[in-house]
Image (cartoon, rainbow, N blue to C red):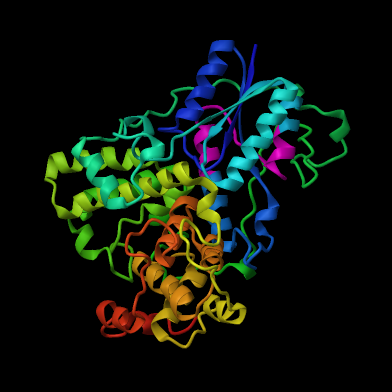
Amino acid sequence: MSNVIHWFRHDLRLSDNPSLLHAVQAAHLQGGSLLPVFIWDPAETLPGPWGPRRRGPHRMAVLADTLASLDAALQALGSRLLVLRGPVVAVLPRLVAAMKAELVTAEDIAAPFEQDEVASLCATARRDGWQLVTTWQSSLLAPDDLPFSIDRAPDVFTAFRQQVERAGVQARAPLPAPAALPPLPSAECLWDPRAAARTMTAQGDGAVPVLLCHTPLKRPAPDTLAYEARSAFPYHLPACAPGEAGGQAHLTRYLQRRLPHSYKATRNGLMGIDYSSKFSPWLASGALSARQIMHALRAFEAEHGANEGSYWLWFELLWRDHFRLMHLKHGRALYRARGLSDLPLPQHDVSAFQRWCEGRTGHAFVDAGLRELHASGFLSNRMRQVVASYLVHELQSDWRAGAAWFESQLVDYDVYSNQGNWLYLAGRGTDPRGGRRFNPDKQAHDHDPEGLYRRLWSTA
């Protein structure tokens, strides 16, 4: 009998989850148990090197709701989600030892912090005689299907897209959710006499739970999180409910309303839910996969026809893949101050950065965007470019500080896209034009000619 753990990371769904299916198959094959687990490190709520904490209140609320949705889906199959607290490198090995697991499966994430976690765990696994298997599964296109190797992937997006399209590469079909799950391990498997006097869930010292139990991740207190009625992504409402069920419902509604056909024409909007697809929050948590979206979009096009709008959704998902591919190719170089460039080290104005975070730069259009971000945890793609450009090019501040603020605030934060977009805008990534500087006055004139957006967000 073999006990298996599936460690959920940014793949908080049951369907189209190859790593989870690997765990299910391994447990079934060996006649063992399967323990689904998510590990929350409270250090994410502490200030980072640039000041902002890695996960602010909006991101915390969405994560808590997404985990609750995942647990409900697991319960429907006779399982549960175990939520533990503490550093992964301390908590996971103790859990493995407590339940005598032989295999841990998890999503592969090609970012430095996440790669360091896995490297440390693999060293422990080799020493202690268990196995950690990670699976790459967050991209639309499988790296093995691309017409080039990772080390020869085009750095410029247009060349990447053209080669993919000329080769006719398409997304593989999404995988169904498991029809049944192996049993949970018995309580005895998790009994640890040393932890008998401790709490049921792991704390910062990495203690294992005494008994198998589900402890929901707490939402931020009401005094630190107010729901924002003006938000373009009101995640507190049913139409934007976090989690796999909410993501699938949103995708269905989006296609039923034939919104893909108008996507390109409206994607630079600033207000409301319908100006863009809003797939990104579910993609970021892994509640939806890119393959699921593309599979549904192709079925939509087969029934209702394709146009420039529906093509542009494919285009944007390719951009998302390109940022992932650049992480696989360039790795830690993307996190250097110079990025991939030979530019001088960026300057940084601490006070200007603080005013920018607070929406007090003095430019009404920029400040409106920053107020929306802080109040709601969301910001349109157009405004993200405007406020990022303002920080880097007008306030002469370090792009990495801006990236850290977006990481703290955005409910659709994605490590690949966030890093890639900030590098791109600062001219330190793979943009052949050497960076993008947006004139905030022209942007306001073009995208908010009547000042409606500025008036909407005139106050925080």
x, y percentage for residue 345? 55, 68
Q: Quadrant of residue 273?
A: bottom left
Question: Per the image, is 321 magenta?
Answer: no
Q: Quadrant of residue 353?
A: bottom right
Looking at the image, how many numbered discs can be counted on the residues?
0
Q: Residue furthest bottom?
A: 362
Residue at 47%, 61% (x, y): give it.
Answer: 342
Question: Per the image, is 82 magenta?
Answer: yes
x, y percentage for residue 89? 71, 39
Q: Vertical placement of 175 versus 441: above or below?
A: above
Residue at 61%, 47% (x, y): give it.
Answer: 113
Nearer to us in this view, 151 or 84:
151
Residue at 63%, 62% (x, y): give it.
Answer: 53
Say whether residue 133 is visible. yes
Q: Residue furthest left?
A: 305
x, y percentage for residue 257? 21, 53
Which quadrant holds the N terminus? top right
Q: Vertical placement of 78 versus 363: above or below?
A: above
Nearer to us in this view, 342 or 360:
342
Does residue 393 appear left or right of residue 431 in this picture?
right
x, y percentage for residue 427? 41, 64
Say whether residue 82 is visible. no
Does residue 198 appear left or right of residue 37 in this picture?
right
Nearer to us in this view, 89 or 423:
423
The residue range painted magenta reads 68-92
Q: Vertical placement of 14 versus 448: above or below?
A: above
Residue at 47%, 52% (x, y): give it.
Answer: 414
Nearer to us in this view, 38 or 316:
316
